[in-house]
Amino acid sequence: MLKIEINREDYWNFNKFVLLQRYKATVYSMMVGLPILMVLILLLMKLPFWYCVSFGVIGGAVINYSTYKSMKRRIMKLLEDNKGILGIHEIEITNEQLVWRNSVTEGSTKWEGIIA
C-alpha cells in the first residue's frame, strides 16, 4: 500500500508546474510582451521616453502579478469545493485491481480497464 499526503503547498506547486508547462509560450510572452507593448503604445502617444519605459515596466509588473494572484486564488478555491483533494491518499495494488482511498471517497479500477 502506498500512502501519499497532499497539502496546500503541494497542490499549488503541482498546478503551477502544469500551467507553466502547458502554457509556457503564453506566460512568457505575457511577462515580456506586455511591458513592451505598453511602452510602444505610450510612445505612439508622444509621451516622454522615460515616462513610457517606467510606466510600461511598472504597469506590466503590476498586471502580471495580479494575474498570478488571480490564477492562484481560482486554483486554491477548488480546495474548498472538493474536500477530498488534500490529506492522505492511499493506493493499493492487487493482482485484480488498483484501489484508491481518501477521506471522502474510495474507488477501484480493474486491470483490464487500465491495460485495454
Image (cartoon, rainbow, N blue to C red):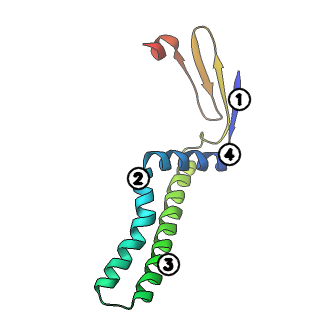
Between marks 1 and 2 in the image, the one whose residue lies nearer the viewer: 2
Task: Give the number of the disc on residue 58.
Answer: 3
Tag nearer the camera, 2 or 4: 2
SS category of the residue bearing label 4: loop
| Rendered residue at 57%/13% (across/down) | 97
Which disc number belongs to residue 14? none
Please name the residue that numbered disc 2 is placed on: 25
Q: Residues within 10 Å of mark 4 (few under 14, many from 20)?
A: few
What is the x, y in percent for residue 58? Answer: 49, 78
3D distance between C-alphas at marks 1 and 4 = 13 Å
Are the two marked residues, 3 and 4, in contact with CB atoms closer than 8 angstroms?
Answer: no
Q: Residue at x 48, y 46 (%)?
A: 21
Residue indicated by mark 1: 3
Q: Earlier in the sequence, mark 2 or mark 4?
A: 4
The residue beneath circle 4 is 7
Q: CA distance from mark 3 to mark 1?
A: 45 Å
The picture quadrant where one finds residue 83 is top right
- First in sequence: mark 1 or mark 2? 1
Q: Secondary structure at mark 3?
A: helix
Please name the amino acid that badge 4 sits on.
Asn
